[in-house]
Image (cartoon, helix red, strand yellow):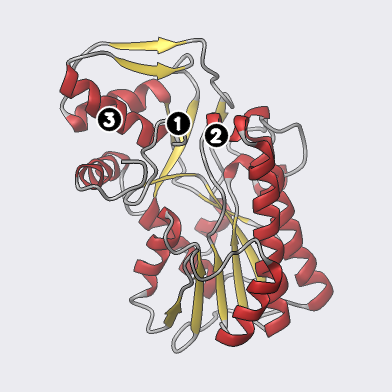
Amino acid sequence: MGAVPFELIGKRVWVAGHRGMVGSAIVRRLASEACEVIIAGRDELDLTDQRAVLGWMHNQRPEVVVLAAARVGGILANDSMPVEFLRDNLLIETSVLTGAESVGVEKLLFLGSSCIYPKHAAQPIKEEALLTGPLEPTNEWYAIAKIAGIKLALAYRRQYGCDFISAMPTNLYGPGDNFDLNASHVMPALIRKVHEAKLSGGEVVVWGSGTPRREFLYVDDCADACVHLLRHYSDDSHVNVGSGSDVSIMELTRLVMEVVGYNGPVVTDPSKPDGTPRKLMDNGKLAGLGWTPKTALRDGVAKSYAAFLNGEGRGL
């Protein structure tokens, strides 16, 4: 097991998935850590190809790895492409963690998702709730893959003494988000819907009932938490990374409308799924390590809307 605190200065840090919202935020955050960030684009390296990943890692010799790469998407994407969400994420995790052990990586951080928890887990959700009940059916393929990644990281700790840790971020949003309405999560979808309703003078359509409650964390806060965990955490349990508070989807819709500057009609679409009724994580473990978020929800939404207007995202 690794020593804590872990020093990043002068280390070669591979951020796998650097073009994604989370990965790019981690690259931004690492700029102030005096380490050498190394990256590989999809045109250079297929993360689902274990042989290619192993060869690349033996050549590049990263000392630290942050696995932020994954096939991700919202309810619709998860529900319509179960094979891709399960298969591709399993392959990515296996390739990168196997390679990390092979080349003697000093520290690895695996990023999961709060969707790993049971649909009806007690709130706020503690890390110990993992595998204590059925998953939310609309994203179980992605969740199962992420659970497998957590367990694979733990297996490498147990069997080979690798300093591999896992973090479970809550719903993230910010620059670089996916604003494609067919593949986006709730925050970018609402930002786009409200913006387009403002332009057309039309109504804002909220999926489901609007009553489910969700926790949101600005992506640069998540990146800061990841660096904090790399430096200050080395143990078996995964660690929740969240804001510690939640809002209903309807409350979030009203907040986005205030930020965008639109006061038109809002309607719900009960034909669309609600997903998990509530998902608020217990962040006591991370707080105990000395980290708390800095960005208030309203400020984060304003930054995200500015990024959307500037074209800083996918699906635009």
Mark 2 lies on a secondary structure that is helix
Q: Is residue 266 visible?
A: yes
Q: Along the polypeptide, which appears first: circle 2 or circle 3?
A: 2
Question: Quarter holding the N terminus?
Answer: bottom right
Residue drawn at 50 percent across, 57 percent down: 287
For the residues labelled 2 and 3, say whether their Cβ atoms are less than 8 Å apart. Answer: no
Q: Quadrant of residue 107?
A: bottom right
**Please, which residue is most extreme toward the bottom here?**
10
Q: In which quarter of the image is residue 45?
A: bottom right
Q: In which quarter of the image is residue 96?
A: bottom right
Mark 1 lies on a secondary structure that is loop
Q: Where is residue 58 in the image (x, y as percent from the top left)?
A: 64, 85
Return the residue at label 1.
182
Mark 3 lies on a secondary structure that is helix
Q: How far apart are marks 1 and 2 (CA)?
A: 7 Å
Circle count: 3
Label of residue 256 in the image: 3
Return the residue at label 2.
77
Residue drawn at 80 percent across, 77 percent down: 160
Residue type at the position of mark 2: Ala
Q: Where is residue 304 in the image (x, y as percent from the top left)?
A: 28, 44
Residue 4 against residue 130 in the figure, above or below = below
Residue type at the position of mark 3: Val
Taking the image as shown, residue 234 lies to the left or right of residue 227, namely right
For the residues labelled 1 and 2, say whether their Cβ atoms are less than 8 Å apart. Answer: yes
